[in-house]
Amino acid sequence: MLMGEAVRGVIVDHALLQYGTIQPENFKSNGTLSLLRKLLFSNIQTAISYVLPVSAEQVNLLQTMAKLHSFECLPLTASSPDIASREIAQTWSHISGTILYLLPNHDASPKITCTYFSIALDDEVTSAFHNSNRIYMEKLEELPLTICHLNKKAISNDLVTVGYIMKPSREEDFAKRGAFPICPTPNGLMFLPLTFELPISKQLEEVDVILHKATDEIVSIELNSSSESSYQIGYTKGMQELQRHIENHNDCFEVDPLNSIYPVLDRLKIQQLLLGLEDLNVGGCCKVRAPHFLKVNSFDEPDLVQRLHDATLSLPSIVKPQVACGVADAHSMAIVFKVEDFKVLNVPLPAVIQEYVDHSSTLFKFYVLGDRVFHTVKKSMPNADVLIKSSEKNGSKPLLFDSLKSLPTATANQHSEGWDPCLDLALVNKAAERLSKRLGLTIFGFDVVIQEGSGDHVVVDVNYLPSFKEIPDDVAVPAFWDAIKKKVDSKAVK
């Protein structure tokens, strides 16, 4: 069937929004409105409707709500689908495609009636209701699922539905850049937001592949002291349900499996994996390497000085929790200037003490999207001499910071003069390919600093499913889609 029959517009009756219980200051955080906002990010025209007559106060509240989210506010003379569909078709005569009109079923079950009909630029307005159909829903959260079902039915069963799950703020960041469209992408993907408000099994019936940021759903991580890379991960109840479904259904396919992301939860494991980059180095050229590091279970170890020396670590050093993400204090870090300060250090244990690399305050952020590698340059922390001078004003106490919020960065006059970092892109691309194979990940990121003097390319961090928002959307988003599609295609030929 024609692409024009994909869902292009959604009208939701105001009664389904329970707007009377929402204060204007909470319009932005309301879950129902957030759901409708996803439609806008998919270029689906979205409107809130109301039937005349309505009080001026109600109209003002609805218009305020609609304006805040860039929805239309659509007055109708009647809520009956036959009349409403004609009025909607007349108002949206510039649209060609399927329109959904959602009404509440008062005191009845199912609670929502969804009338859908197709309109075209050259159609008669009066034909809209004649070609209408109905679907019934219990919850408004079923709307994205309904849209994906209708799109696949109207366009092609060959469309690939990507079910995704991550925290709302991250989801919105991806969606508003157009990365998660419910309408088909040029390479045949549709993105369905999975929700724990509905049974996971029902949603996965429509899903061909799962994309998750599972670290957003972690509630606890316990490291096993008897094994350096063994840990117990506690997920939210919803994520546990998804995990069980994946384990019990062999046809349930993930872009990146859960077990492939486990190494990025553990900074020690990542450091050990990075040691494997050494064999990419060729004599006479700059090197790519891991930073020198040391794992500690206690900052009170009597032989700590000797262990630091054996690990080729000098001060200042940066101290990070071994748990890399998923828990509140995973990003609580410190830069330590004196050995005696380890004893009073307030960084979660076990921890990884990592080499502090002088890098001219320049950080290279790399993003791997399938077989494509992108990078951007960011301002970073100053060199050690600047940090030492700054710390002396505070009695050389450890510099504590949260790496997600307050990473200390160099000012304009703190950059090194006479030395510019020269990035060996071919070398780092080889490292990206190696990491992709070792980690078994399709979409990940890593940070590189170039050591002053030696020119060593030091990989200081690795993370899963980064936002890659520093890369222009018109470049990164299609590469993101292609990475997922190629992963699905590779699974199909196995």
Image (cartoon, helix red, strand yellow):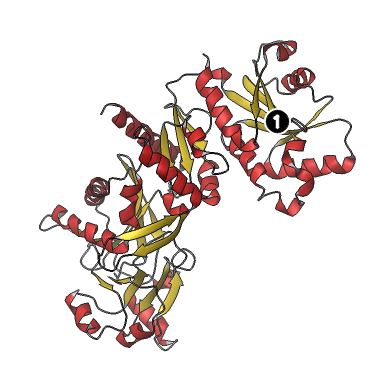
Check the image and report above or below for 13 versus 366: above
Q: Tell me, yes or no, if residue 451 can be seen here.
A: yes
Residue at 39% over, 40% down: 246
Is 81 placed left or right of 445 in the picture?
right
Check the image and report above or below for 474 versus 471: above
Q: Tell me, yes or no, if residue 289 can be seen here.
A: no
Residue at 77% over, 48% down: 21
The three-letter code of the residue at mark 1 reads Ser
Is 56 placed left or right of 238 in the picture?
right
Check the image and report above or below for 42 versus 460: above
Is 12 placed left or right of 38 in the picture?
right
Given residues 12 and 419, the one toward you in this image is: 12
Q: Residue furthest left?
A: 283
* Relative image position of residue 220 (x, y in whole percent): 43, 61
- Secondary structure under the numbered disc 1 in the rendered image: loop
* Relative image position of residue 176 (x, y in whole percent): 55, 42
* Relative image position of residue 191 (x, y in whole percent): 49, 34
Please tell me how crowded label 1 is: few (under 14), some (14-19), or many (20+) other residues with Cα within 10 Å.
few
Quadrant location of the C terminus in the rendered image: top left
State the image quarter where residue 399 is shown. Answer: bottom left
State the image quarter where residue 458 is shown. Answer: bottom left
Residue at 20% over, 66% down: 454
* Relative image position of residue 471 (x, y in whole percent): 43, 46
Given residues 407 and 1, the one toward you in this image is: 1
